[in-house]
Image (spheres, grey):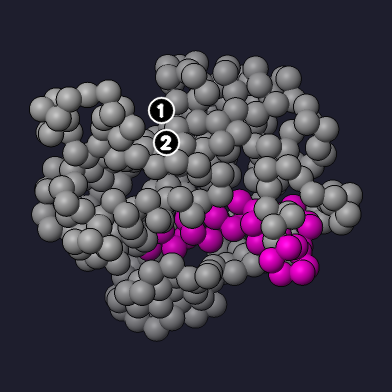
Amino acid sequence: MNTFGSKWSFTSFGESHGAAIGGVLDGVPAGISIDMNLIRTELDKRAGRTKHGLAQDLSKTQVRVSVRAKNEPDEVEWLSGVLNGVTLGTPIAFLIRNKDARPEDYEYLKHTYRIGHADKVYEQKYGIRDYRGGGRASARETAARVVAGCLAKQELATKGVRINARLIQVGAETDPAKFAETIAAYQREGDSIGGIIECRINGLPVGTGEPIFNKLQAELAFAVMSINACKGFEYGTGFEGVTQSGSAINHLSGGIAGGISDGSEIIFRCVFKPTPSTPKAGVTGRHDPCVAVRAVPVVEAMTALALVQFL
């Protein structure tokens, strides 16, 4: 399926090297003044163009976060549901044109499959595939999620809910001051490395989440695990809890009890794998040395889209 949610229904469309990517949002209330600056900032974070934090450090070490992302302006065109920057309550359609698409870079994939990608299973499932940079399976699609997530963030903010994600680990390195050089070292070798993102949610009302099949952590995991390259999700003590006694971890539930928020800060973490297509692996094309860097705003966006369904 290409649709997420039912109350705030978000459908994304488009392929990596097609004419455009975009989305349709239904269920968004009328009267929301869209914060265009927020959308611009979040899209720049996803592209690695931000002038703050890790991306700035990466530029100092001459790490190339993503050649394509650097060249894509990611200009949002609002097709419907918005008038003078204010939502009308009708379906919102938007698109982002692919202005730096280079399908010729992937001609060699017409008759081969990349290890670690969805190339082969897409062809086995559908009998045809878009070989141009992974087509629908490309992380290029996440730009549309960021736009939709920004609207959800705005609605959540009116209810006092705040979402903040950050990169907390690159490979085995946990010192943020060393992240940039760690990534640079892998890039110099023509290789890539994975990372862990932590997300904190504050201001979520007590009682958010439903028993049994719509538990809060289940919905968050469903949203986050849909992001390209995400390989794992944990909340509270997570997998470390297996080494602790029950008395030690009873108070470290990550803000969720029985699938329902308890009013305290909610903390979860997700892990992103290294890019499998690298020069060291003999693969040509445009690839990130660490996809986790640009996944931070995508994690926030999907978290917002999951939470807004409950509220």
**How many dots with numbers?**
2
- Using the numbered discs, state the Cα–Cα distance from disc 2 to disc 1 in whole angstroms: 6 Å
Label 2's element?
Answer: strand
Q: Where does residue 65 sit, x and y in percent of width and height?
A: 63, 34
Q: Residue at x 65, y 17 (%)?
A: 185
Per the image, the residue denoted by label 2 is 197
Earlier sequence position, callout 2 versus callout 1? 1
Locate the C terminus and report the quarter of the image it occupies. Answer: bottom left
Residue closer to the observer: 224 or 20: 224
Q: Where does residue 131 sit, x and y in percent of width and height?
A: 79, 57
Per the image, the residue denoted by label 1 is 168
Q: Residue at x 25, y 55 (%)?
A: 216
Q: Where does residue 284 sit, x and y in percent of width and height?
A: 82, 39
Find residue 154 and report its image quarter: bottom left
Farthest residue, direction bottom: 90
Q: Is residue 42 visible in the rendered structure shown here?
A: no
Is 19 drawn above or below residue 68 in the view shown?
below
Q: Where does residue 286 sit, x and y in percent of width and height?
A: 74, 41
Amino acid, disc 1: Ile
Label 1's element?
Answer: strand
- The question of residue 148 being in magenta is answered with yes
Label 2–label 1 contact, CB within 8 A? yes
Is 37 drawn above or below residue 245 in the view shown?
below
Q: Residue at x 42, y 36 (%)?
A: 197
Please, what is the dominant secondary structure of the magenta stretch?
helix
Find residue 96 and report its image quarter: bottom right
Q: Is residue 149 visible in the rendered structure shown here?
A: yes
Amino acid, disc 2: Ile
Is 222 drawn above or below residue 181 in the view shown?
below
Q: In the displayed structure, does residue 224 sit left or right of residue 108? A: left
* Residue range of the region highlighted in magenta in the rendering: 123-151
Find residue 189 and report its image quarter: top right
